[in-house]
Amino acid sequence: MRGRGRLLAALAAAALGACQAPGATAQPTPSPSAAVDKQLAAADQRFWSGDYDGAESLYQELVKSEITGAASHYAVFLAYESRFPEAVTSAEAGVKQKADSPNLARLTRALDWADDVDAAVAAGTRAVSTAPVEPLAHAYYAEALADAGRFEESRQQLHAAENAHPADRYTQAEIFREWANFYRDQGDAQGELNNTQLALKMQPKFPERAIELARYYYAQQKPAQARAQLDAATKLSDGYGVHLAAGDSAFYSGDLDVADAQYQAALGVRPAAPEASLGAAEIRVAGTRDFRAAHDQLLQALKKAPGSAGVYQFLWYLDKLVLKTDPAAEVSAIAAGAQAGLAADRQAALDAVNAYRQQAGVLALTADPALAEAAEEHAWYTIFNFGQPSEVGLGIHTEDPSLPGFTGANFLQRDRAAGYPGGRGSEVINHVYTPPAAVEVWIDSVYHRFPLLDRETQAVGYGEAQIGILAAAVMDVGIGDPTKAQPVVFPAAGARDVPAGFVGHETPDPAPAGTQYPVGYPVTLTVGSASTFSVQSSRLLTADGNEVTGFTLLPGRQVDAGEWCFMAQEPLRPGAAYTAEVTGTLDGQPFTQHWSFTVTGPQ
């Protein structure tokens, strides 16, 4: 123990020096959260001590009583439990009640963990600009900035959090955790480990700190150390939420035996609970291929919790796609209204796409039920076959007839099988947790943006599947006949609050081999697919006329024949204005397009 203590002390000294932490003579100053209702502070303490059930009950009671800040604190709890859509909804309610720094900070966390990074950055900007500023706002904002590829600003926010000298141990631990996140994004595994361990030392009774360290070890291919940390977390608390979080972490890392043991332990605490039942059923489908056992587990869970949309959808598509039985005969009578959530999410996805199309000056799309069903079926196919080699890279868009859930080898076959009559289409997929965030990720990329903003696109259908931290969001795209439509540019002319950077993670990778992310936000232009389009020159200019260094994707080469893209080598400068210029020929005639936009951030 003493040796380990000395190691942690040494790690603390090194990390504190690197992070410019306050000196020994600094006096902590109370944050705005010090004045939070005592009952709300008590709920936080229950959570941090591992009493997840007790914490949730108290949070819900305080939310019902409309205690200021309760919805926001509850949102952070929900985010730790991987209940991301609920977390965002609760955090938004907290900000609606009072748009102060503490509530805006927690909205930042909920949005960021739901992968809605642009919205998280916007919320974080408000959180650190609304006095009095809670130190935690700087920490949560730093994570969102790092996830957006704005590393220097992230570093500045972490220093601001440290210099605020927070008095509570949770905020102090979160600062270490965010430094770990920062170093991970920089590829510094040792820096990540040091700060993850310091977060655990600062808050040793909070099970999530040990689980975070387990995730680090799993990522480093050290399963024995990861399992030891999961054991440590569950010794701190034998509660349902801790076992569930441990199971999710092990499952996502491919440690199925440990994951199943943790899910079973969770079900021992709370029999037939939806979340643990989903995890256990997923292991039986994707791991052991015991489909009947998965079916029985889900059916039991649905009978106990008929309002669980996740259990309903998993069981429905397991029946339909794998067991080849009529799901309506079995499922609908138990949970007739459980599909309402999916319908709302499909509308939210459509609204998000159409909002971007409105910015770009193109007509709104309609929802197509056949495309939606094909997308939903493929989302569940990816869940049923999680971990299969065929799902890697662009294989995520294909299906193997030898695997469970097969409906068509490619998206057009699946669309037609679902009843879509069109002959042209596309498909975009990611692993994001809410419809607006999924659409944002597609629009903020290159290849996934083009079909969603194309003038020839007419309809879309959205599908989703989620089990804990494992998610699939799919949008199938119906495209009309080729045209010679007018160009579409994005960011649109006159656009403001344009993201500064693009962090990559797109397949295929649009940047040249060896590119270091983040790069500048993609600037794109699309013409009708019936047109003949060539580009002789193109550039991106700063407000004072300097040409920005970057790389161009030319029509018919790195992108399709009617497409063009430019990405700056470095993220664009926050608050700066830029002008794009593209010169060439369009249908045999000279063509020039130039337009300007402004990046989000201070001028």
Image (cartoon, rainbow, N blue to C red):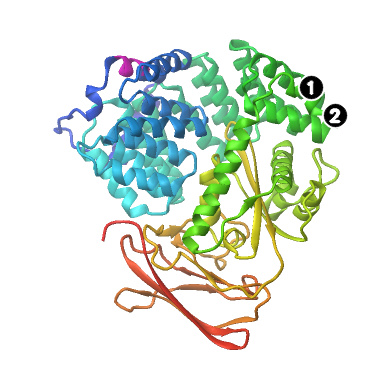
* Magenta residues, start to end: 39-43
Q: Residue at 79%, 22% (x, y): give it.
A: 330
Residue with the mark numbered 1: 330
Q: Looking at the image, is 211 positioned above or below residue 354?
A: above
Residue with the mark numbered 2: 325
Query: Circle 1 — which element?
Result: helix
Amino acid found under the numbered disc labelled 1: Glu
Q: Residues within 10 Å of mark 1 (few under 14, many from 20)?
A: some
Picture coordinates of residue 170 (x, y %)?
33, 27
Q: Looking at the image, is 593 positioned above or below residue 510?
A: below
Picture coordinates of residue 206 (x, y %)?
41, 22
Q: Residue at 33%, 37% (x, y): give it.
A: 104
Picture coordinates of residue 595 (x, y %)?
42, 73
Q: Quadrant of residue 533?
A: bottom right
Q: Mark 2 near mark 1, Cβ–Cβ under 8 Å? A: yes
Residue 41 located within the stretch drawn in magenta: yes
Q: Tell which circle, 2 or 1, labels the residue nearer the N-terminal end.
A: 2
